[in-house]
């Protein structure tokens, strides 16, 4: 696809300046932002049910919310955003919901590519992507190729992702290389994950109140700060993201050490 290259970001857009100013006024330290934010976008189904809508309509609204949060994270100056779109366990859902989600992700990947490229977003994927429908794989691949040299936020979509699956795949790769058991290190496992060059998430946000990881980035989030929002994902707005960042900034990260 021929899409014009992103405008060189020599100066910040007025929308970015306004959002950063708003974050500052709400108490966010812009010099100390989480470098990598991961989000478990949960609550689409409950959001729809509460309104008497089909679950898929909740997913559609969720995708709209994602557009706003991706742009907000990018404007704030976050370097990596990783979002959970479909887990390896989500195949257990009714087939029409699963197929609807696959179609929705594909449509979103195609429809949003221009906007992402114009905003200098680098698109990336994580998960057992080879197991999703071929047309979705193609749309995701096209997104990654088109934006591969962009220098703004790295946006990673987790599709057919499971943390245990990822660790299992890493161990298989290490064993396949003939590495002796005694030489296996934590660094080696990290290097064999799907995105070895990304820093671990600093902040993991889960929406809709559930306090669990649901198999998301379980290796990488060993020391990630978890912030749970009661807001359902379709209602999650840039101000909620700013609030989560503020909560993160009030935490003391100790990594097992004594911090006075
Ligand atoms: C999250 O919303 C989206 C996916 C898991 C694909 P849910 O569909 O899990 O929403 P709830 O948890 O049923 O409300
Ligand atoms: C996690 O949410 C997966 C995604 C957000 C894609 P789930 O709704 O599937 O998690 P559980 O089932 O409540 O743990
Ligand atoms: Mg859920």
Image: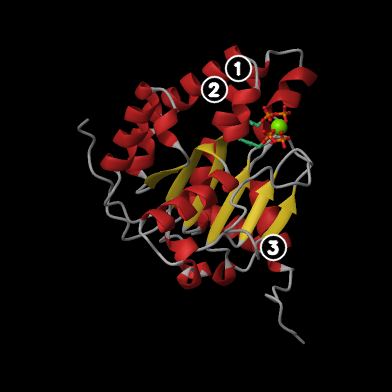
The residue that disc 2 covers is: 101
- Crowding near the residue tagged with mark 1, few <14, some 14–19, many ≥20 C-alpha atoms within 10 Å: some
Label 2 vs label 1: CA separation? 6 Å
Residue at left offset 29%, top offset 48%: 148
Pointer 2 residue Cβ closer than 8 Å to ligand 1: yes
Label 3 vs label 1: CA separation? 34 Å
Of marks 3 and 1, the one in the foreground: 1
Whichever of callouts 3 and 1 sits on the residue coming sooner in the sequence is 1
Q: Secondary structure at mark 1?
A: helix
Q: Position of residue 52 (x, y in %)?
A: 76, 12
In the picture, measured across the screen, residue 14 lies left or right of residue 243, that is left
Camera-side residue: 24 or 237? 237
Camera-side residue: 246 or 44? 44
Residue at left offset 48%, top offset 62%: 190
The residue that disc 1 covers is: 97
Quadrant of the rendered image holding ligand 1? top right
Numbered tag placed on residue 202 in the rendering: none
Q: Secondary structure at mark 2?
A: helix
Asked if residue 240 can be seen in this view, the reply is yes
The residue that disc 3 covers is: 248
Q: Position of residue 43 (x, y in %)?
A: 71, 32
- Asked if residue 229 is positioned above or below residue 180 in the image, the reply reads above
Q: Position of residue 115 (x, y in %)?
A: 38, 36
Q: Position of residue 194 (x, y in %)?
A: 44, 50
Label 2 vs label 3: CA separation? 31 Å
Residue at left offset 69%, top offset 47%: 213
Camera-side residue: 68 or 159? 159
- Asked if residue 35 is positioned above or below residue 115 in the image, the reply reads below
Do the residues under discs 2 and 1 have CB atoms within 8 angstroms?
A: yes
């Amino acid at each position: 696809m021929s899409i014009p290259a992103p405008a060189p970001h020599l100066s910040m857009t007025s929308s970015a300046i306004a959002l950063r100013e708003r974050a500052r006024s709400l108490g966010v330290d812009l010099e100390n932002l989480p470098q990598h934010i991961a989000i478990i976008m949960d609550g689409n189904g409950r959001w729809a049910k509460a309104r008497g809508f089909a679950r898929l309509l909740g997913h559609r609204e969720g995708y709209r919310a994602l557009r706003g949060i991706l742009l907000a994270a990018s404007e704030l100056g976050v370097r990596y955003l990783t979002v959970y779109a479909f887990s390896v366990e989500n195949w257990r859902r009714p087939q029409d919901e699963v197929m609807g989600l696959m179609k929705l992700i594909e449509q979103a990947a195609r429809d949003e590519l221009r906007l992402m490229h114009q905003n200098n977003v680098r698109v990336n994927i994580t998960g057992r992507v080879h197991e999703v429908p071929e047309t979705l794989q193609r749309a995701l691949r096209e997104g990654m190729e088109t934006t591969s040299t962009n220098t703004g936020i790295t946006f990673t979509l987790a599709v057919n992702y499971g943390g245990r699956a990822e660790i299992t795949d890493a161990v298989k790769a290490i064993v396949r290389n003939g590495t002796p058991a005694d030489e296996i290190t934590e660094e080696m496992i990290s290097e064999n994950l799907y995105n070895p060059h990304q820093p671990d998430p600093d902040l993991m946000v889960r929406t809709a109140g559930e306090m669990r990881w649901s198999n998301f980035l379980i290796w990488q989030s060993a020391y990630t700060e978890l912030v749970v929002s009661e807001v359902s994902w379709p209602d999650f707005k840039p101000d909620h993201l700013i609030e989560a960042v503020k909560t993160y900034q009030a935490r003391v990260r100790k990594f097992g050490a004594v911090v006075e």
